[in-house]
Image (cartoon, rainbow, N blue to C red):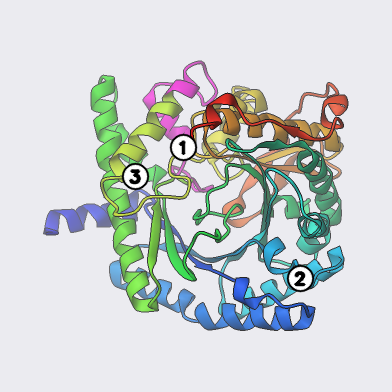
């Protein structure tokens, strides 16, 4: 039963503490759209998306009005397009045509983003996978609302270093292709290890082949709510701190569960999962870095940061998992630089470096996220960063990712403005020592010994 005090508490979280439901994401299986003819495939894709998702945005807006909870984004995730286009796409340009079709459908139904311009290449690349990957720079430059993700490794298969090398090159080419917009194409491109099938957050969202024909996944947020709660327990011991985070995560997740169930019922599509992740925004006070500082750090990046983030991530999961019937996606704490004002402040203060962020990714939701780097960074250096993050994910049996933006024409000391939820970022220095001999070896890094559990 919900009583009036809980209603008032939720209202306060919305009005004063930046509580929102970050996204309602509809997952759509496109395998039935595949055809040997490219035009038929594109028509099938457009018709299926616009049919299933025609009421997604209006339903989200209705729920937000009726419940008084902001629902910031309405998104769609799709079956990895490398699978859907394998029968009809003979060149990278063929895949670009599919990408343009997706963008047209996204504009038609009014969603913020469509994810799933993706390939799963953790063990090897098919010809179709490689064509899609090589199409990414042109696809990102010729569309607005498409997000691309490539999974290059997993705990079970190891790391596909051929794909890692190729993705370093594609990140650079995407930066060049969108340099007139400060290389924003790279902000919609992420390289993953152990990518989950049901992640509602962009840019890594796709609709896994193990999912139903269509599904509703919801991503909740609320760093501001956690920060507000921790203000009242300053100086208390870790037991009190952890209990406060757990209880707050429970309340945040209950709001998400309510929205997810209502969206599922109104759209007539099954409820999938709640993603518990604390996803920051550029808004003042809506910051994971601010939470870390309230836990006791002068700035994010100070000694103790990784331990504090591990504590936060674990307590969010412990509190949230009791509040939802199905939890999935990434579920923890995101640490994107450009989308978190506290992280930006820490970079500008000199307390936070890429190396410290990499250490933090061992215990957080995802990885090196929304980091702007010098535009002259070599492709092999980017591949080395991807390999490092993939190794962390592979060994630790967790999702890791790299979303770095080499901003063409900018260097350390400059700032780049992306706008909206993507925020702005200082250009961060990258280790300039060469790793090309390592990246160029080719082949696959084998799966770790602990992957053999059958």
Place of residue 225 in the rendered image (x, y in percent of width and height, measured from the top left): 34, 44
Pick the residue in front: 14 or 391: 391
Quarter of the image holding residue 435?
A: top right
Q: Earlier in the sequence, mark 2 or mark 1?
A: 2
Residue at image mark 3? 225
190 sits to left or right of 437: left
Residue in the image at 54% along x and 47% along y: 282
Looking at the image, residue 363 lies above or below residue 371: above
196 sits to left or right of 277: right
Place of residue 234 in the rendered image (x, y in percent of width and height, measured from the top left): 29, 25
Q: How many marks?
A: 3
Residue at image mark 2? 87
Q: Nearer the viewer, mark 3 or mark 2?
A: 2
Pick the residue in front: 436 or 369: 436
What residue range appears in magenta?
280-307
Residue in the image at 46% along x and 80% along y: 55
331 sits to left or right of 240: right
Helix, strand or loop for disc 3:
helix
Helix, strand or loop for disc 2:
loop
Crowding at dot 3, Cα within 10 Å, few <14 / some 14-19 / many 20+, comes out as many
Place of residue 32 in the rendered image (x, y in percent of width and height, measured from the top left): 60, 76
Q: CA distance from mark 3 to mark 2?
A: 48 Å
Q: Are marks 3 and 2 in contact (CB under 8 Å)?
A: no
**Does the image show residue 298?**
no
Residue at image mark 1? 288
Of helix, strand and loop, which mostly describes the magenta segment? loop
239 sits to left or right of 214: left
Helix, strand or loop for disc 1:
helix
Q: Nearer the viewer, mark 2 or mark 1?
A: 2
Place of residue 345 in the rendered image (x, y in percent of width and height, measured from the top left): 57, 33
* Quadrant location, the N terminus: bottom left
């Amino acid at each position: 039963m919900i009583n009036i005090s809980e209603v008032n508490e939720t209202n306060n979280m919305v009005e004063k503490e930046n509580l929102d439901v970050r996204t309602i994401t509809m997952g759509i299986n496109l395998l039935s759209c595949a055809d040997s003819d490219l035009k038929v495939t594109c028509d099938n894709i457009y018709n299926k998306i616009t049919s299933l998702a025609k009421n997604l945005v209006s339903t989200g807006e209705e729920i937000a009005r009726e419940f008084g909870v902001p629902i910031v984004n309405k998104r769609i995730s799709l079956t990895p397009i490398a699978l859907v286009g394998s029968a009809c796409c003979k060149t990278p340009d063929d895949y670009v045509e599919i990408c343009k079709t997706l963008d047209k459908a996204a504009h038609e139904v009014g969603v913020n983003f469509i994810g799933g311009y993706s390939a799963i290449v953790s063990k090897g690349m098919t010809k179709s996978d490689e064509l899609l990957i090589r199409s990414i720079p042109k696809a990102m430059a010729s569309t607005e609302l498409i997000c691309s993700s490539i999974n290059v490794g997993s705990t079970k298969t190891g790391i596909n270093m051929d794909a890692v090398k190729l993705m370093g090159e594609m990140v650079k080419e995407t930066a060049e292709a969108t340099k007139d917009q400060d290389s924003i194409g790279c902000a919609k491109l992420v390289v993953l290890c152990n990518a989950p099938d049901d992640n509602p957050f962009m840019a890594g969202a796709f609709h896994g082949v193990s999912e139903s024909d269509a599904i509703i996944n919801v991503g909740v947020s609320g760093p501001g709510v956690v920060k507000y709660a921790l203000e009242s327990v300053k100086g208390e011991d870790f037991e009190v701190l952890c209990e406060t985070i757990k209880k707050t995560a429970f309340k945040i997740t209950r709001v998400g569960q309510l929205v997810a169930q209502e969206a599922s019922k109104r759209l007539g599509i099954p409820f999938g999962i709640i993603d518990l992740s604390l996803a920051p925004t550029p808004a003042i006070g809506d910051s994971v870095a601010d939470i870390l500082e309230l836990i006791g750090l002068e700035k994010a990046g100070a000694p103790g940061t990784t331990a504090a983030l591990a504590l936060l991530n674990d307590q969010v999961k412990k509190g949230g998992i009791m509040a939802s019937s199905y939890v999935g996606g990434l579920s923890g704490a995101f640490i994107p630089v450009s989308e978190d004002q506290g992280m930006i402040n820490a970079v500008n203060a000199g307390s936070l470096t890429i190396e410290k962020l990499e250490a933090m990714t061992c215990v957080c939701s995802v990885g090196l996220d929304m980091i702007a780097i010098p535009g002259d960074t070599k492709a092999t250096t980017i591949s080395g960063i991807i390999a490092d993050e993939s190794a962390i994910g592979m060994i630790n049996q967790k999702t890791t990712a790299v979303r770095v933006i080499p901003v063409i024409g900018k260097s350390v000391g400059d700032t780049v403005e992306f706008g909206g939820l993507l925020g702005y970022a200082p250009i961060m220095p990258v280790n300039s020592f060469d790793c090309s001999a390592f990246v160029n070896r080719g082949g696959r890094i084998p799966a770790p010994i602990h992957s053999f559990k059958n």
